Image: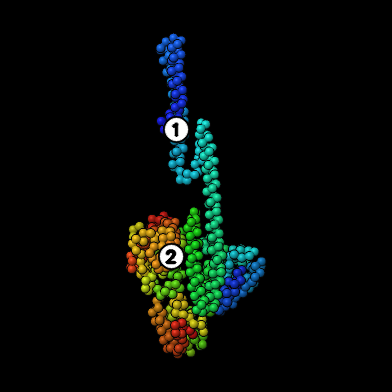
């Protein structure tokens, strides 16, 4: 999936790109704000992230001009936080609106949601690591021709761990991930969920897939 | 205008008239004019004077009474000059001229303060939007370099952000024009969104969150209400006793829908409870447990007042605090 980022703050842009790249999105950007509209459309991106305060033309103008020539999804990302801006963006054809400083999980979730909606055919909802395949759409995990069904919470936990393979994910981060989907679980529930998930993975042959890092969290 | 004060004003004229009449009587006596003729002349003068005075009094009192009535019925009395009637006697003309000048000067003064206040507010809003960019940068840098140090920095930026948000809403609550938009909101999704927004702090302190019967629709400004719930959550975290548990529940009676947010924190003493919504009030807890600015709940109250919502606190020491946000139903039917 390719994203085109229109943002004039260089530090923010660089960091945003490296974050998105770590989540397997390829990113493109440009400093040529005079011709940013053609640059953005010519990039053939799957989604455009658009700031409102820009040199030469503001984001509203850019948004309207892109809409005239292309149907590419546009997500407005801005630090201005009032209804007028949100209304303007939506009226000019933006697909979503998010304010800075954004919650990164929410940003990623919204990007994924838009991409899923607009690219239904070629949207890959499978993650693979060390022979273990996780199908997000079916909520099922496969390992060497065996499969196990996961509950909503187990699916969330495993997908976060797999997306951040080789990185330690703290219990707090996992819990936060579950909370983002309206499951306000406590510490005990998380332990129960992780243990059940481990058991299911063991049953299909992937024993010790999730490692415990004492005092720090879990890792795949 | 009272008759007595009018007559007091005319005392010199009355004395002069009396003197003239006495003088006339004496003079005519010298010329041996009959008593009846003298009485007739005197009476004529008296009657003419009375009629003239009465006319004068009527005109004045009518003018001033009307002016008084207009003034009383006005809400913003500084605009009285523009409602002045054109007077038909000299004193009032002078007074009206002065009044016009004075009110104009005053209104100019008020306008200049209004403009400077608006400009300041606009500056604050712009500043807040600008400061959010470096905060986003710090946040992203921390996300991209996850370790113990950046995690701590991340936690601090959350605090910075909450103070900034408070400043933004403070600026907005002082705005004379109401720049909020009342919409139909689901209490359930609103509470969930607010909890998610504060998930990191809540999880960080090992809090439990319990939601119960939030299946109601209310009318309010989404962002403002989100801010208010956020402030209440932040307070619960600040003043927790042991492991924090937060209960969100809603109930309905004949007039209102009530959202109750209950914690099991240290509670508020009876003497402080009545004053928690006052600006700058910190109370025993604010001084003893955490640095308190006395702004959070005051702002919540201000914003609630602007949206015509009720906000009440219920608490006792050691037994936690419950905050009720009250959504009146009559207002809802009015908005529907």
The spot of residue B21 in percent (x, y) is: 44, 18
Q: Which residue corresponds to mark 1?
A: B61
Work out whether B98 lies above or below B334: above
The spot of residue A216 in percent (x, y) is: 46, 82
Work out whether B4 lies above or below B256: above
**Chain name for mark 2:** B
The residue located at (55%, 52%) in the rendering is B115
The residue located at (44%, 56%) in the rendering is B306
The spot of residue A154 in percent (x, y) is: 43, 80
What secondary structure is found at the residue carrying circle 1? helix
Residues B46 and A82: in front is B46
Residue B155: numbered disc: none
Q: Quadrant of the N terminus of chain B?
A: top left
Work out whether B300 lies above or below A183: above
Q: Nearer the viewer, mark 1 or mark 2?
A: 2
Query: How much space separates mark 1 and mark 2, taking CA atoms?
Result: 58 Å
Residues B172 and B15: in front is B15
């Amino acid at each position: 999936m390719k994203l085109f980022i229109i943002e004039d703050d260089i530090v923010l842009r660089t960091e945003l790109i490296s974050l998105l790249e770590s989540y397997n999105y390829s990113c493109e950007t440009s400093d040529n704000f005079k011709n940013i509209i053609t640059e953005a459309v010519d990039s053939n991106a799957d989604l455009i992230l658009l700031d409102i305060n820009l040199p030469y033309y503001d984001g509203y103008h850019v948004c309207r001009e892109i809409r005239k020539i292309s149907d590419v999804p546009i997500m407005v990302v801005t630090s201005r936080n009032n209804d007028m801006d949100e209304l303007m963006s939506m009226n000019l054809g933006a697909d979503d609106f998010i304010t800075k400083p954004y919650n990164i999980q929410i940003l990623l979730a919204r990007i994924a949601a838009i991409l899923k909606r607009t690219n239904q055919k070629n949207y890959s909802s499978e993650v693979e690591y060390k022979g273990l395949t996780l199908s997000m759409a079916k909520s099922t995990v496969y390992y060497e021709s065996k499969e196990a069904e996961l509950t909503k919470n187990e699916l969330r936990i495993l997908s976060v761990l797999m997306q951040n393979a080789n990185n330690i994910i703290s219990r707090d981060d996992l819990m936060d991930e579950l909370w983002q989907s309206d499951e306000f679980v406590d510490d005990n529930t998380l332990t129960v969920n992780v243990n059940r998930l481990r058991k299911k993975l063991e049953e299909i042959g992937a024993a010790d897939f999730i490692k415990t890092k004492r005092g720090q969290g879990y890792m795949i | 205008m009272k008759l007595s004060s009018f007559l007091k004003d005319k005392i010199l004229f009355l004395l002069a008239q009396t003197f003239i009449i006495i003088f006339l009587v004496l003079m005519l006596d010298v010329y041996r004019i009959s008593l009846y003729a003298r009485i007739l002349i005197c009476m004529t003068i008296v009657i003419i004077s009375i009629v003239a005075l009465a006319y004068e009094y009527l005109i004045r009192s009518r003018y001033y009474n009307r002016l008084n009535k207009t003034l009383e019925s006005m809400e913003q009395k500084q605009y009285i000059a523009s409602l002045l009637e054109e007077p038909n006697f000299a004193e009032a003309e002078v007074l009206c001229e002065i009044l016009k000048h004075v009110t104009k000067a005053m209104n100019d003064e008020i306008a200049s303060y209004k403009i400077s206040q608006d400009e300041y507010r606009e500056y604050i809003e712009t500043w807040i939007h600008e400061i959010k960019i470096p905060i986003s940068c710090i946040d992203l840098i921390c996300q991209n370099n996850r370790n113990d140090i950046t995690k701590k920095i991340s936690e601090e930026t959350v605090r910075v952000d909450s103070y900034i948000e408070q400043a933004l809403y403070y600026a907005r609550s002082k705005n004379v024009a109401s720049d909020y938009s009342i919409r139909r909101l689901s209490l359930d999704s609103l509470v969930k969104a607010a909890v998610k927004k504060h998930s990191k702090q809540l999880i960080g302190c090992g809090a439990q969150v319990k939601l119960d019967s939030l299946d109601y629709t209310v009318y309010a400004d989404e962002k403002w209400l989100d801010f208010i719930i956020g402030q209440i959550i932040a307070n619960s975290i600040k003043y927790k006793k042991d492991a924090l548990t937060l209960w969100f529940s809603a109930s309905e009676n004949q007039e209102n829908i009530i959202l109750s947010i209950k914690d099991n924190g240290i509670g508020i003493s009876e003497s402080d409870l009545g004053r928690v919504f006052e600006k700058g009030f910190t109370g025993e807890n604010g001084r003893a447990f955490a640095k308190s600015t006395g702004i959070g709940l005051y702002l919540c109250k201000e914003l609630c007042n602007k949206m015509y919502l009720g906000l009440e606190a219920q608490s006792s020491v050691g037994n936690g605090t419950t905050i009720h946000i009250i959504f009146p139903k009559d207002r809802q039917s009015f908005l529907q």
